[in-house]
Amino acid sequence: MTSSRLLLFDIDNTLLYSGGAGSVAMTAAFRDIFGVDDGFGKIEFSGRTDRFILQSALDTHGIDGDFEAQLTPFLERYYALLPATLAEKQGTLMPGFPQLLSSLAQVPNARLGLATGNFSEAAKFKLAYYGIDEFFTEGSSLLGGFGEESIDRADVVRKAMESVGAGVSAEQVLIIGDTPKDITAALDNGVTAVGVATGSYTTDQLRDSGAHMVFEDFSNWRQAAEALTGA
């Protein structure tokens, strides 16, 4: 019997490019809740979890208080703004999607999930807007690990493995992302790191970060599906 294989995807610049909708909506929400314009201007988003990004912005602007109490109104405002912001921006699916997901979904014993820095509801909005939420949904819930769970991306990967990967050995888990932080998070969990250079990092940079497998993009989705599933 073939072992189950778990493929956990990052979202931004891996599955899709939202045109910056997430950062625009987060910036507007931060202004509305905390009264600071361009609250994330000095914060690096790439490869970070949304929890880390928000905490960094609060620290940068000297906004003290209980983080969980601050998180609730911020998320309410962010989620209220994001759908319209997605519609305003010129985003796109990355090369090879949704074909790669369709192909992987048909592979026996292959499971799909997310290991994303996005807050879970933001992930749902983005995937639904670009029409690929069905590949990562069970009932009304997205499958995976999300940005509210930790400031550390390795924790998000571990949460995803626990929630989606029951019975799957570490040797059969692949983390697919576009940044060195995706690669490091995979390595920290002892699983296979797959880099795709559709973000701001090159194949060489991803390989130098320790990626076991690197793609320029997934435009050759048939070949990518075979490589990712060992078919």
Image (spheres, rainbow, N blue to C red):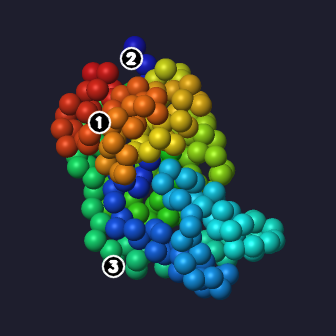
Q: What element carries label 2?
A: loop
Q: Which amino acid does label 3 sit on?
A: Glu
**Residue situated in front as seen by the camera: 77 or 108:** 77
What whole-number distance in Å separates the C-alpha atoms at marks 3 and 1? 30 Å
In this rendering, the label closer to the viewer, 3 or 2: 3
**Residue situated in front as seen by the camera: 148 or 129:** 148
Mark 3 / mark 2, whichever is N-terminal: 2
Residue under numbered circle 3: 88
| Residue 81 against residue 209 in the figure, above or below | below
Q: Which amino acid does label 2 sit on?
A: Thr
What whole-number distance in Å separates the C-alpha atoms at marks 3 and 2? 45 Å
In this rendering, the label closer to the viewer, 2 or 1: 1
Residue under numbered circle 1: 215
**Residue situated in front as seen by the camera: 186 or 45:** 45
Q: Pinpoint residue 22: horizontal percent, then vertical percent.
A: 46, 68
- Left or right of 130 in this view: 179: right
How crowded is the residue under tag 1: few (<14 C-alpha within 10 Å), some, or many (20+)?
some
Q: Is mark 3 on a helix, strand or loop?
A: helix
Q: Which residue is pictured at 39% across the width and 38% down the height?
A: 205
| Residue 84 against residue 210 in the figure, above or below | below
Mark 2 / mark 1, whichever is N-terminal: 2
Disc ID at residue 12? none
| Residue 62 against residue 6 in the figure, above or below | below
Q: Pinpoint residue 179: horizontal percent, then vertical percent.
A: 44, 45
Q: Pinpoint residue 94: horizontal percent, then vertical percent.
A: 27, 53
- Left or right of 54 in this view: 7: left
Farthest residue in the right direction?
A: 65
Q: What residue type is labelled 1?
A: Phe
Q: Which residue is pictured at 27% across the width and 21% down the height?
A: 231
Disc ID at residue 2? 2
